[in-house]
Amino acid sequence: PPPTSPPPASPPPTSPPPPSPSPPPPPPVPPLTPGSFVIYRVTLSAVYPGTVETFDEDAYKQLVSDTTGVSPDDIVVTNTQPASVLVDSYAEVSTKAQAQQVEDDLIAACAGDVLGDCQQTPTTIEVAVSTPSSPPPLSPPPPPSPPPEEQPLIKDDDDDNPGLIGLVALLLIIPIAFAIYVAIVYRGRVGLYLRWRTTHSNPYIRWR
């Protein structure tokens, strides 16, 4: 019988696709200026089910908080795009050790699709921020206004001449007393009395 040909060799097994390369390391932080300090942001980019319109940012931040232990107030969603919803966010912590722990938690969550379909491996970047400047000191209150100047008392010249005042009073009292006397003695005949006192019929008035 004719010889049989050997069976064809099986194709070599296909190798799995290489993993996506990790993003390049972030640039080093520039020298800190006085009053500045370093914080650490662990970035995350994931495709989350839903749409941009129905995406609940607070619920997603709470989900990241439950996964990493970082307060929702320190989790920032920086961007959302349709894809279902491509969510870019970061968790902000104050020490490098905390950042490493958060990064490990996010990597584990990405492996289980807890936070959606992660598009890249979570990474940590260092950010220099400035200390909030203190408010400027309050300006001192204005000095109190000086007390009003006392005006010198203007003395009446009459106060310095009591004799003059007495003389004027006496000159006024004599005619007033005479008028009262005439009005009482010559009641009803004051006019006649005055004509008599001031005409030539008065024997005491000499015309020549």
Image (cartoon, rainbow, N blue to C red):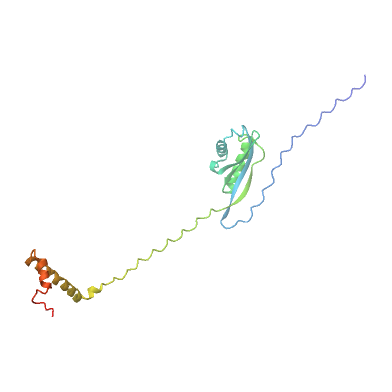
Give percent across and percent down for residue 181.
9, 68
Return the x and y of residue 98 as percentages of the image width and height.
Answer: 58, 46
Is residue 44 among what the camera can see?
yes
Front residue of 84 and 26: 84
Q: Identify which residue is drawn at 64% across, 39% down.
A: 45
- Examine the rendered structure and indicate whether residue 202 appears above or below residue 109: below
Q: Position of residue 128 (x, y in %)?
A: 60, 52
Quadrant of the drawing holding the C terminus: bottom left
Measuring from the top left, give residue 54's x and y in whole percent: 59, 32
User: Which quarter of the figure has residue 69?
Assistant: top right
Total marks in image? 0
The answer to whether one can see residue 71 in this image is no
Q: Nearer the viewer, residue 130 or 68?
A: 130
Nearer to us in this view, 64 or 193: 193
Q: Is residue 180 left or right of residue 67?
A: left
Is residue 167 rendered to the left or right of residue 23?
A: left
In the picture, residue 182 is in which quadrant?
Answer: bottom left
Please give the name of the residue rendered at 23% of the width and 73% of the height, measured from the top-left corner: 158
Q: Nearer the viewer, residue 75 or 21?
A: 75
Quadrant containing the N terminus is top right
